[in-house]
Image (spheres, rainbow, N blue to C red):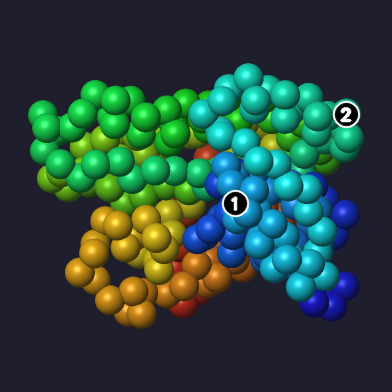
């Protein structure tokens, strides 16, 4: 990528849930745009494979094998980033789990609780730990991935829909609390995309009929760039004309 097209040159970006799907595609796009990527996921092998993709586009990354439901681990990560970089310029909250698609009253309590822990509480811990680092940046940016089921009723999706609705209110409330500063926070709904989670939710669907995760890279790069002025917005992933961010 030409230097003029590297809007994140010299910046530090953390991708939570980086190892596959939209998280992996966004990581490559952010690296290609010049960011040093801090890639967080549970599995070492998947992170190493992603690191190879990042290096292939001329980027570099720090790999962090971490279960984001480990709140103390998230706090330690924040402390380590502060010691190494002193700031965080971009945060992409992508980690999520689908949970069980069953009637609400048939959902196992442990499954419901784990879905909320992954989709809501883990993001709360990220916000809590990373906000001081984002404020230390001259133009901190944060984006969290959401879903259309957060805003419409879909039978059998109770745990996932409840978790995404809670995530949206968490992020939008945080955005309202920090309004007026240099930090910008938004939600991004990618819509139907060719991912493993989508295949699990719709096993009869032809994956080739859906856009690949890489289609979201440009919009996410723009939302996480210093030039983005949007704040506290719900952004739809329009694949033909990716999100306008100023």
Residue indicated by mark 1: 18
In the picture, measured across the screen, residue 15 lies left or right of residue 237, that is right
Residue plotted at (46% across, 77% down) = 240
Q: SS of the residue at dot 2? A: helix
Residue 246, percent from left and from top: 63, 58
Residue 226 seen:
no
Residue 133, percent from left and from top: 77, 31
Label of residue 27 in the image: none
Residue indicated by mark 2: 83
In the picture, measured across the screen, residue 87 lies left or right of residue 222, that is right
Q: Quadrant of residue 4?
A: bottom right
Residue 8, percent from left and from top: 79, 58
User: Is residue 208 placed above or below 157 in the rendered structure?
Assistant: below
Q: CA distance from mark 1 to mark 2?
A: 22 Å
Callout 1 environment at 10 Å: few (<14), some (14 to 19), or many (20+)? many
Residue plotted at (66% across, 61% down) = 50
Q: Quadrant of residue 96?
A: top left
Residue 154, percent from left and from top: 17, 47
Residue plotted at (24% across, 71% down) = 205
Residue 239 seen:
yes
Residue plotted at (37% across, 56% down) = 197
């Amino acid at each position: 990528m030409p230097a003029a097209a590297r809007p994140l040159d010299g910046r530090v970006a953390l991708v939570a849930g980086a190892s596959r799907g939209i998280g992996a595609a966004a990581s490559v796009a952010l690296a290609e745009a010049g960011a040093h990527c801090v890639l967080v996921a549970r599995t070492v092998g998947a992170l190493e494979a992603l690191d190879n993709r990042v290096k292939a586009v001329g980027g570099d990354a720090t790999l962090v094998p971490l279960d984001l439901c480990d709140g103390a681990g998230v706090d330690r990560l924040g402390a380590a980033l502060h010691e190494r970089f002193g700031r965080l310029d971009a945060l992409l909250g992508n980690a999520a789990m689908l949970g069980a698609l069953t009637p609400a009253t048939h959902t196992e309590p442990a499954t419901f609780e784990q879905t909320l822990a992954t989709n809501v509480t883990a993001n709360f811990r990220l916000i809590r730990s990373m906000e001081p680092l984002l404020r230390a940046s001259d133009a901190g940016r944060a984006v969290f991935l959401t879903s259309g089921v957060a805003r419409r009723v879909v039978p059998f999706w109770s745990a996932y829909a409840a978790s995404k609705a809670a995530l949206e209110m968490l992020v939008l409330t945080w955005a309202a609390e920090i309004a007026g500063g240099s930090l910008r926070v938004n939600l991004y709904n990618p819509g139907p995309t060719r991912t493993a989670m989508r295949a699990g939710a719709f096993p009869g669907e032809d994956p080739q009929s859906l856009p690949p995760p890489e289609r979201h890279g440009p919009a996410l790069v723009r939302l996480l760039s210093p030039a983005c002025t949007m704040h506290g917005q719900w952004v739809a992933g329009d694949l033909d004309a990716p999100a306008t961010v100023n």
